[in-house]
């Protein structure tokens, strides 16, 4: 049976500045829920090379970014301290919209036996959507935590969650996911005690 992992995506200061202030506590709750249940957490963050030599000028998203943003020296590229990786949690850097872009995320997931991805992050119309679509096409089971995702355009967030992402996987809330994790843990048979 495949394992589940939480992907916390683009929770960087530069992205958090574009979503409502009440978003971050929901992302923190998702992270705490995963950690409490023993679900592996993988942090995904945008990182471009200095001077953006890996961003083509024709790319509407990345070609127009000022070349100092989302580089290793950019303070806005840091993962917010409230959701920072703890010891042993994997951090994967991407250089395009999807969490799978420009890295070995798929290899890591395979090596860890992970077949179910639970997605949380910024922006719903960016990394969440592109990662959900790609993950579904790669035959991963996908769950989107609707309240642990945010978009600068709340209407777009609602449309994507209700009409698009629900067609590719499951959409739930952090609280409902936590209850499901608890129910699954209680349903597992107890391991026999060695004597």
Image: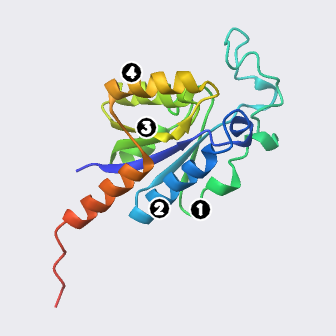
- Residue sitting at x 25%, y 59%: 184
Does dot 2 land on a helix, a strand or a loop? helix
Q: Is residue 131 left or right of residue 167?
A: right
Kindly report which numbered mark, 3 or 2, lies closer to the viewer in this rendering. Answer: 2
- Residue sitting at x 46%, y 21%: 159
- The residue at which mark 1 appears reads as 86
Dot 3 crowding, Cα within 10 Å, few <14, some 14–19, many 20+ = some
Does dot 1 land on a helix, a strand or a loop? loop
- The residue at which mark 3 appears reads as 106
Say whether disc 3 or disc 2 marks the residue closer to the N-terminus: 2
Q: Position of residue 4 (x, y in %)?
A: 35, 49
Say whether disc 4 or disc 3 marks the residue closer to the N-terminus: 3
Q: Position of residue 189 (x, y in %)?
A: 16, 69
Say whether disc 2 or disc 4 marks the residue closer to the N-terminus: 2
Q: Is residue 161 visible?
A: yes
**Mark linked to residue 163:** 4
What's the CA distance linking mark 1 and mark 2? 10 Å
Q: Are marks 1 and 2 in contact (CB under 8 Å)?
A: yes
Say whether disc 1 or disc 2 marks the residue closer to the N-terminus: 2
């Amino acid at each position: 049976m495949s394992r589940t992992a939480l992907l916390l995506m683009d929770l960087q200061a530069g992205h958090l500045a574009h979503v409502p202030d009440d978003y971050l506590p929901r992302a923190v709750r998702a992270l705490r829920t995963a950690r409490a249940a023993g679900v592996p957490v993988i942090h995904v963050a945008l990182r471009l090379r200095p001077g953006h030599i890996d961003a083509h000028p024709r790319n509407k998203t990345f070609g127009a970014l000022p070349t100092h943003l989302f580089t290793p020296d950019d303070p806005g590229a840091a993962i917010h301290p409230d959701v920072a990786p703890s010891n042993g949690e994997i951090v994967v850097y991407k250089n395009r919209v999807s969490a799978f872009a420009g890295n070995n995320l798929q290899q890591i997931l395979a090596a860890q036996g992970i077949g179910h991805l639970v997605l949380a992050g910024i922006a719903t119309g960016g990394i969440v959507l592109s990662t959900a679509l790609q993950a579904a096409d790669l035959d991963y089971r996908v769950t989107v935590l609707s309240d642990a995702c945010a978009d600068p355009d709340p209407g777009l967030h609602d449309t994507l969650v209700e009409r698009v992402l629900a067609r590719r996987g499951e959409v739930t809330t952090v609280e409902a996911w936590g209850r499901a994790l608890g129910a699954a843990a209680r349903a597992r048979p107890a391991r026999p005690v060695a004597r």
